[in-house]
Image (cartoon, rainbow, N blue to C red):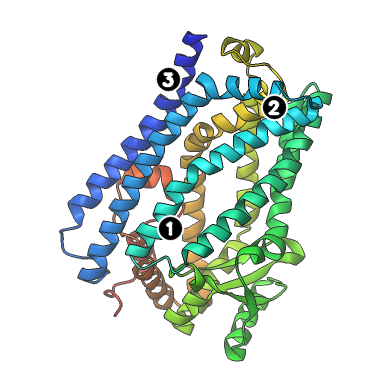
Amino acid sequence: MVYMLYLLGFIFIVFYTFPSIVLSCLQFKHINSHINKNPIILSPKDWQEAGEYSLAKLRVSIIQNIIEAVVFVLWIGIGLFGLENFLKEWDIFENVYFLTYVLIFLIIGAIISIPMSFYVTMKLDKKYGFAKGTLSLFIKDTLKEFAMLIIIAGIVVFLLIEIIENFYYWWVYSFLLVFMLAILANVLYPILIAPIFNKFTSLNDDNLREQIEYMMKKVGFRASGIFVMDASRRDGRLNAYFGGLGKSKRVVLFDTLLQKVSQEGLLAILGHELGHFKHKDILKNIVIMGIVLFILFFIAGNLPQELFNSIGIEYNPATMIVFLLLISPVVSFWAMPIIGYFSRKAEYGADEYGAELTNKRALAEALIRLVNENKAFPCSHPLYIFFYYTHPPLLERLRALDYQGGGVD
């Protein structure tokens, strides 16, 4: 038993915790070496703030990696065994026991994440002018997230338990279920989930709406509406996106974006997003997500029963689901470079298409504004980019757009 605990802890730390921390340290050193150099694109003040914010976030990331490793070791060492013994004292039906086991595991994980989430949102992001929400709003959001976790996870886990108990190749059917639910979540998110946290109102700028609708018609993109989200209630960062699938598709503009980006720049950003639609990047992302999920379920479905027995827990649907959740960070980490490669390639294509719909300079200056307002440091270590970046670094995107100008006022 002790040997297996050491082995599992070793695998998690060597293949996830250690490389994650190394990458963060490389990025930290890289940014620290550039922060005192002559600013590029950004003003000296914004350059300094962006660098300091990035360094602070990297410190948080390293702490989170260490906490994850400690929590993993505690779960496989005493947590899963203790939870099993605790629930066995209850006189409940078997499937209720399995469901409760997984939900308690998820709830404990969510509770453990609250202090760091509070620090980032209420301390760090407030310090750098991002977070606008109050403590009351943070508590309300946290309670909403807990309620959604219990409801959604409860449904999914219940279905997974039924599949595991009734099918020999349970991992294949479980993959298909989760894959379909992930697609369904994309359909329902903009109309059911997002409104729980934010208010969405129809865009009341007729001129801007007409121009957006003209661009969408030109590309063949049909949306259920163009909405403005009250992002400024919580955060000062800028963004826009096309949410949903099928008839639930909608254009969402952050109110902060409307306040700080010119109309020409906003249209260029939306043109970039329409480029993703034109190139069918959403479908490609769904395929990639499916491949990663399949690998994850394949690994979980082929874990030997002896593994569970060796650490003193039963081999049953609940422990199989929990192990799937425990190993998911490792699988996701090593999938990120592949996902990132295709994503960065897609971003170049979307930039090119967005520039064709509007113009290169408008898109380039809009990207600079986004980086400026979001305090994103424009220089990163190549290995950190390779693992984590889903978007190319700003300077590379600007070079691809043949931008020769300076920063923004």
What element does badge 2 sit on?
A: helix
Tell me residue 67's x, y (percent): 41, 35
In the structure shown, which secondary structural element does the residue marked by tag 3 occupy? helix
**Along the line of sight, which residue is nearer the eye, 277 or 380?**
380
> In this rendering, does residue 292 appear at all?
no
Distance of label 2 from label 3 (alpha carbons): 24 Å
Q: Earlier in the sequence, mark 2 or mark 3?
A: 3
Name the residue that disc number 1 marks.
121
The C terminus lies in quadrant: bottom left
The residue type indicated by label 1 comes to Thr
Q: Is residue 30 above or below residue 129?
A: above
- Residue of label 2: 318
* Identity of the residue drawn at 56% across and 54% down: 142
Mark on residue 10?
A: 3
Of the numbered discs 1 and 3, the one sitting upstream in the chain is: 3
**Percent x, y of residue 81:** 59, 19
- Distance of mark 1 from mark 3, alpha carbons? 32 Å
